[in-house]
Amino acid sequence: MPAPILSLHDVHKSYGRGATRFDALKGVSFDVLEGESLAIVGKSGSGKSTLMHLMALLDQPTSGTIALSGTDAASLHGRTLNTTRNKTFGFVFQQFFLTSGASVLENVILPLKIAGVGRSERRRRGLEVLARLELDDKARNRASDLSGGQKQRAVIARALVNDPRVIFADEPTGNLDTATGAVVEDILFTLNREQGITLIIVTHDEELAARCDRAIHVRDGLIIDAEAVAA
Amino acid sequence: MRTIDVIGSAVSNTFRSKTRTLLTILAIFIGAFTLTITTGLGTGINRYIDDTVASVGASNGMTVSKNAPDAPTGDGPRAYDPNASTTRQGPTLTAVELMDDSDVTALRAIDGVTSVTPIDAITLDWVRHGDGTQYQAAIGGFFSGSALQLAAGAQPSDTSSELQVAIPANYVDSLGFDDAASAVGQTITLGLTDGAHQAQQVDATVIGVANPSLGGAGTTLVANTALSANLHDLQSTGLPAAQQGQFRQASIRFADSGNAQDVTALKTRLTDAGYTGQTVADQLGTFKTVIDAIVVVLNAFAIIALLAASFGIVNTLFMSVQERTREIGLMKAMGMGSGKVFGLFSLEATFIGFLGSAIGAAIGIGVGSLVGNALGKVLSNLPGLHLIAFDPLSVLGIVLLVMAIAFLAGTLPALRAARQDPIESLRYE
Ligand SMILES: Nc1ncnc2c1ncn2[C@@H]1O[C@H](COP(=O)(O)OP(=O)(O)O)[C@@H](O)[C@H]1O
Ligand SMILES: [Mg+2]
């Protein structure tokens, strides 16, 4: 059995101190296997985003450990941490976070620019990934000129361009109508199936969660059994 | 992120909000423009003074006079001394003791003095070309190593045995020459009265035509060594023996180490020996100090304008950081280091500073040159004066200074951007 790509052990996360202290996560443990698709489901305010930020190494747990391919994340700092995040993760957010004035291509190659990839190589890989998402004819357009579905495809292209091992998607279809949302879902699951990219989707949509290999349900900072949800 | 990409991104971010950037650049432009003009003014005037120093006397030369034995202690007039001669230097009346061969020996003995030449005051009666009108004229000797600002011809020669004279440009017409160039090589006649009250005349060749400049150079005829000696001999002819070989001033040369302290030390030794020494730089020094003070004040105003403009940069960048919160958060989530984020914003500020100062300096040079030329025509009695001149190094210095100020102004907003927490920036519920 391969080592889990992400492994959480008794993770706690608290915000604030003293009287205003709020425990967003109260002891969460689970593994994410390489290549699987995992849904993190729960109501608004249950702690899903907090959990995702911790898994994406954007934040440190108050206590407990998170390991990336067996390496304790607490041992990663500064440049190493930044490089790891840049090479390993891709992000798809509910809001698109595209720079509206810049071209679609410029937006998509941002992770490569941050990684220090050269200009022509960036362009080549950017156009390639846009072609895969059928957006190559929009490469020169300003990001603000795209429709909602096209924007989310551009965001997926940006998440993909640096060949990540894990894609985090926080409410990826929340801002899209049902038809467009379904298209974006298909793209994500195809990537997961065909390229073996681990997919972690944060959602409150049970239907989307059901399409994943596995779902973790979060309530008030704790994981509850799938049976308890069904019940 | 590669440094080149940080720079490229900073430059393109600058143009994202065009109106805001333009207004900020305009504010910096005004400061840089003013600074360029005021510095140009200082450069122009000081360069002219430096040229003039060369035309008045060599830098290793000094004019020495003998102090009257009873130097005045109060403000009152001094007692009459039959052996003293009065000279007027500007508004002050100074009595100097006449000197003779014993003073030459004494001066030569002073440490550092390499040569002593008596300055023979020669009184000309008139100057004339051919059979033309006689004009009043004053004549002085030529210091070798100094330079006249020539309109035509060459500097008088120290070593030539030919009797040479340089004439001021405003004598060209009067003496009946078509222009400065055609005067060169012509013979003019100088008239004077000798010691026996007899009229004498000497023919001399016009070697050059000098433009007037500060310090009185170029307003009198200038004789080379051969002509000076000739005129002096003539003037002394028939003088009573007691009055022969006397002179009021001597020019000395000293070993020039280029060190101002050595010159000061030499002056002290001269004073101790009862003489007063003045270099040309001394005579023009006060003038230079005043110019420098004026330029410093003008520059201070320009710097104040720049400081005001730098608050514009702070404001512009804070707005820019505010607007790009999400983008910064995203870049940091994607692995961009805080240092690079800081670099991105502080470079943007520096680039705004560069644009404002480069445009300000360029237009400042253009306008300054135009105004300088126009003023040059108004001040045409001082040819060679470019009121506003530009030294590439100081212009570069201005651009770098403004970029440094802009960078400093950018650090505050850039720090805020660098410290931003990506999670906070990306939170949207
Ligand atoms: N920085 C913070 N400071 C204080 N409380 C926070 C902070 N971030 C999140 N929380 C709280 O933690 C809880 C979980 O938030 P979040 O993980 O965003 O929930 P979800 O994504 O499931 O809606 C919420 O009650 C929220 O108010
Ligand atoms: Mg959330």
Image: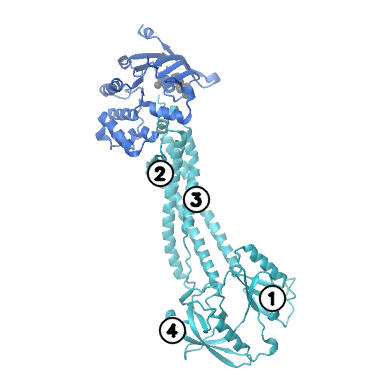
Chain colours: A blue, B cyan
Determine which residue is flagged by label 3.
Answer: B401
B54 left or right, relative to B89: left
Determine which residue is flagged by label 2.
Answer: B20
Residue visible at 24% across and 35% down? A137
> Residue B128, how many percent across, how many down?
50, 88
Determine which residue is flagged by label 4.
Answer: B177
Please check whether the numbered discs 4 and 2 fall on a single chain: yes
Query: How many residues crowd around disc 2 within 10 Å: few (fewer than 14), some, or many (20 or more)?
Result: some
Tag 3 and tag 2, C-beta contact below 8 Å: no
In primary-sequence order, the first of circles 4 and 2 is: 2
The CA distance from mark 3 to mark 1 is 50 Å
In primary-sequence order, the first of circles 3 and 1 is: 1
> How many marks on residues?
4
Determine which residue is flagged by label 1.
Answer: B66
User: As shown in the figure, which amino acid type bears the numbered disc 4?
Assistant: Phe
> Residue A24, how many percent across, how many down?
46, 18
Query: How many residues crowd around disc 4 within 10 Å: few (fewer than 14), some, or many (20 or more)?
Result: some
Q: Select label 2 or label 1 by which is in front.
A: 1
In primary-sequence order, the first of circles 2 and 1 is: 2
Mark 1: secondary structure: strand
In primary-sequence order, the first of circles 3 and 2 is: 2
User: As shown in the figure, which amino acid type bears the numbered disc 1?
Assistant: Lys
Tag 2 and tag 1, C-beta contact below 8 Å: no
Query: How many residues crowd around disc 1 within 10 Å: few (fewer than 14), some, or many (20 or more)?
Result: many
> Residue A33, how many percent across, how many down?
37, 17
* Mark 1: C-beta under 8 Å from nearest atom of ligand 1: no
